[in-house]
Image (cartoon, rainbow, N blue to C red):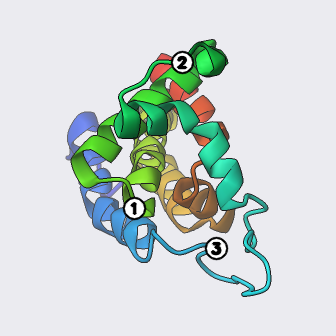
Amino acid sequence: MPFKHLSSNKSFFIILLLFTPIYFYTRLYLLDSNGPFFYHPSSDMGTTGIAVFDEFFYMSKAIFWSKYSLYDKYHEYNLSTPFLYISNLLTYLSLKIIGLNLFGFRFPAVLSGFIIIFCFSKVIHNRFGFIASFFFIAYLIFDYHFTLANRTMNPNIFRLCVMGISV
């Protein structure tokens, strides 16, 4: 095996280091536009099936926190589950740091995708080794649906992130 001389953790971090720039380039490039690949101008949804209105609804608590510094009882349901709490907290911090725009709004989904790749690939690397971890990371970085999930504010990506952190 050509990678036998590398320690387990060192080889994992080498893989992650190689793929990290590719991941962030494919996710952050034109992040503020709708539907990254096959966007149709007559529809607001593109290929994601999620309109900007849906994204606003999922993260409305974070927007109200950042813009108006309000805490309203009407949106209390947004904090009822851990993934919604984490998504609203990350979105709030992103909106405060980057600003109230689509880039700042969608950036937490990009970070959640990176956490997903890190957590699950670490488990696969420990269980199955270097090659399996390499192909898993490459698959998630270049998978069309995972790319779309990382570029829109969809709560499902945060569910998977919480699951990855708990593993």
Instruction: Classify mark 2: helix, strand or loop.
Output: loop
Q: Is residue 123 above or below residue 102?
A: above
* Residue at left offset 58%, top offset 56%: 152
Badge 1 or badge 2: first in the primary sequence:
2
Q: CA distance from mark 1 to mark 2?
A: 25 Å
Q: CA distance from mark 1 to mark 3?
A: 13 Å
The three-letter amino acid code for the residue at tag 1 is: Phe
Q: Nearer the viewer, residue 28 or 19?
A: 28
Q: Mark 1 or 3, which is nearer the eye?
A: 1
Badge 1 or badge 3: first in the primary sequence:
3
Q: Which residue is mark 3?
A: 35
* Residue at left offset 26%, top offset 53%: 98
Q: CA distance from mark 3 to mark 2?
A: 31 Å
Left or right of 124, for residue 114: left
Q: Nearer the viewer, residue 134 or 92?
A: 92
Q: Quadrant of the N terminus?
A: bottom left
Q: Which residue is mark 1?
A: 103
Badge 3 or badge 2: first in the primary sequence:
3
Q: Quadrant of residue 70?
A: top left
Instruction: Classify mark 3: helix, strand or loop.
Output: loop
The extreme bottom residue here reads 41
Q: Mark 3 or 2, which is nearer the eye?
A: 2
The three-letter amino acid code for the residue at tag 2 is: Asp
Crowding at mark 1 (Cα within 10 Å: few <14, some 14-19, many 20+) = some
The three-letter amino acid code for the residue at tag 3 is: Gly
Q: Is residue 32 above or below residue 56?
A: below
Residue 129 visible? The answer is: no
Q: Which residue is mark 2?
A: 72
Left or right of 129, for residue 59: right
